[in-house]
Every structure is written in C-alpha cells, then in structure tokens.
Image: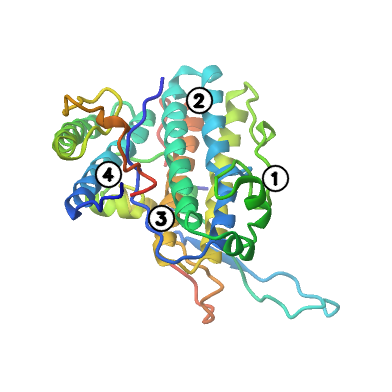
Amino acid sequence: MKSNPKTFTKVKSYVPYHSPCDPCPPIGRKYYSTPPNLYLGFQPPNLPQFSPIEALKRGTLWPVFYDFYENPYKKRAGKEHE
Amino acid sequence: MWSYEKKLQYPVKVSTCNPTLAKYLTEQYGGADGELAAALRYLNQRYTIPEKVIGLLTDIGTEEFAHLEMIATMIYKLTKDATPQQLRDAGLGEHYVAHDSALFYNNAAGVPFTASYIQAKGDPIADLYEDIAAEEKARATYQWIIDMSDDPDLNDSLRFLREREIIHSQRFREAVEILKEERDRKKIF
Amino acid sequence: MNKTLPQEYYKQLEEIQVADFVLIELTLYLDTHPTDTQAIEQYNQFAHYSKQLKEKFESAFGPLQQGSLNRTPEFWAWKSGPWPWQV
C-alpha cells in the first residue's frame, strides 16, 4: 500500500460530530495538515531544486517538500487547498 | 564542540508593533515542543544512538539552536521598545514583573522549561520516533501561531521555520529506515 | 552608538544566508544519503562560494565567526555590534 507521491493533497478535512445538545453553533469543517514528508518515503536522488534564493525564502531546496500554510478557517468558501 | 556565527539563519523581519505576539512566540522558545527542547533532545540522544545517524542528530540539533535564536529575535524586536503598560496590555504583566523585557525559557503560559519535556530512551527506534513526533508537534505549533498573527513579515519567518520542521521530520523518518536496515536488500517506493 | 547599517550590509548578508542555507539543506540530505556524489559536488561548490562571500563581507563589516581574521589591528572587532537579533 504505497501512496503515489505525485497525487497527494496537503490538507485534509473532516466534520466533527455535532449533537443537538451542543451549546455552540458547529464549527463545520476541521482541517489538518498532511505535509509531503508523510508521503514521500526515502527521498529519491536528483529531485528538482529551487534556485538558492527561492530555497531560502521557502525553507527548503526541493519543491516537492514545500507546503505553504495559511489559516484554513479564514477561507470561508470551503474549497480544499492543493 | 560549538562555534557561533554572527548571523541569523534566515532574515527575520517584524513589521507590526504587537507585543501580544511575543507571548505566543514564547511557546516555541521555552515550551514543550519548542526549539530549545528540540536542540537539547537531539544533542543529548546522539551520544547513544547508532553511528550511522549521529551526524544527523548533531546537525539538526545545531540547527535548532539557530532557530531558537530566530524566535528570540522576534520576541526581542516585539518587546524591546514596549512600556510596562504596553506589556501588561499584551498579557505580559507577570513576565515584566519578574524579567522586565528579558527573555526567559518558559512557555506561553509562563510555565518554566523542564527537562521532562524531552526523553532519551537509549533505544534508537524509540528515540527517533520521539524526534519525529517532536517535529510534527513543532510544525503544528507554528501553524497555530501563524493563525494568531496578522503580521505578514513575522508569518513569513514562521512559515520558514514550519517548513524546516517538515524537512527535519523527513530526515528522522529516513533515519528510521536506515536503522531498519532493509534498504540495501530491495528498493520499493 | 547607533549607526544605521548600509543597504550593502543587508544585501551581502542575505547572499551569505542563501549560500549557507543550501549548505545546511545538503548537509542534512547527505547525512541520510551519504553516497549521492552529485549532491556532494553541489555541496562543495557552495562551500567554496560561501567562503568567498564571507571573506568579502568580513573585510567590510567585521568577523562573522570565532576564528575569523581580525582585520583591524588596533581593535577587537568581534565584540562589536550589531548582533544578529538587533539588525
């Protein structure tokens, strides 16, 4: 059971159970991060690299590991991140 | 042994004067899943880990001190010009009374750092899985701090640090694979 | 004594941070991939490049690390600011 590193998504979501007895309005979707290190296995050699300046800005030399984070609850549209 | 380089690993900029953020950043300074805990954990474990992964633990442990310095820089910039009233309004009144705007190794709630945050079981698999967990916890903590912050420059540095945690987690996972010693037998990805 | 640093300081410092970042990324990679000769070659290129950048920086702005040359014979420049968290 191997995940294909080319097709994973970096954010997942689920809807927590909401009971009619809950005092507060439901939060709706909860999101959690699933960054690339979960899917890649042992890093293969010769992966493409960022330019050095880009690498510093992004925090890694390899685009495959790059995962931009922003607050998923700020986006009200409910669409999945990629 | 260690030597010091007079530069930050990444240029830290803070553009909004908001000392409240300093309180949250302290979680990564002296907190359970913060940079100090990480550095001390890895640098201590490396004495009794199999030789194949000593280099990795030494290098990541050293990098964590560089990250500690970055967090310190953020906190310093946010609090150095604050008056006692501003610090109190930021929820740092108790901190001020004990420290003025000196930094200290406690978490965001003021709980002082303790070695209980780290472990060294002497079992390399246990130790490495603790390290992977530590990196994931640090990654999550950066996410929560980014959620609390509206400062785009500060968030840029926090995103850098979060990305470093992803890479560290990757390397520790690879270290586990190396110690499993299955890699030379057959390559399956 | 609070002198403002010239833009050149920030520019050169960032170039060094860029080069050293590539070095640390490759160091961690090589710690788990010790036989990747292409990575070793890239590491050495950047090690050389970083050294050149640092020599240039230090001539203008003072020592960056313990053991660096003190180029001002009448003054111990290492203890001078600014320090990284002040910059």
Horizontal and vertical percent for residue A78?
54, 78
Query: In the rendered image, is residue A49 in sight?
Result: yes
Camera-near label (3 vs 2) is 3
Tell me the amino acid under the disc marked 1: Val
- The residue that mark 3 highlights is B157
- N-term-proximal mark, 2 vs 1: 1
Q: Residues within 10 Å of mark 2 (few under 14, many from 20)?
A: some
Measure how far apart labels 2 and 1 are at the Cα level. 36 Å
Q: From the viewer's side, name the closer residue of C77 and B173.
A: C77
Measure how far apart labels 1 and 4 are at the Cα level. 34 Å
Find numbered disc 2 in the image and state the secondary structure of the residue it sits on: helix
- The residue that mark 1 highlights is B111
Q: Mark 1, chain letter? A: B
Query: In the rendered image, is residue A32 in sight?
Result: no
Measure how far apart labels 4 and 3 are at the Cα level. 14 Å
Measure how far apart labels 2 and 4 are at the Cα level. 33 Å
Marks 1/4 same chain: no
- N-term-proximal mark, 3 vs 1: 1
- The residue that mark 2 highlights is B179
Find numbered disc 3 in the image and state the secondary structure of the residue it sits on: helix
Tell me the amino acid under the disc marked 4: Gln
Tell me the amino acid under the disc marked 3: Ser
| Rendered position, B101 above or below B42 | below
Query: Residue C17, labelled with which disc?
Result: 4
Query: Residue A75, labelled with which disc?
Result: none
Q: Mark 2, chain letter? A: B
Q: Residue at x 60, y 35 (%)?
A: B130
A47 relative position to A35: left or right: left
- N-term-proximal mark, 3 vs 2: 3
Horizontal and vertical percent for residue A68?
42, 61
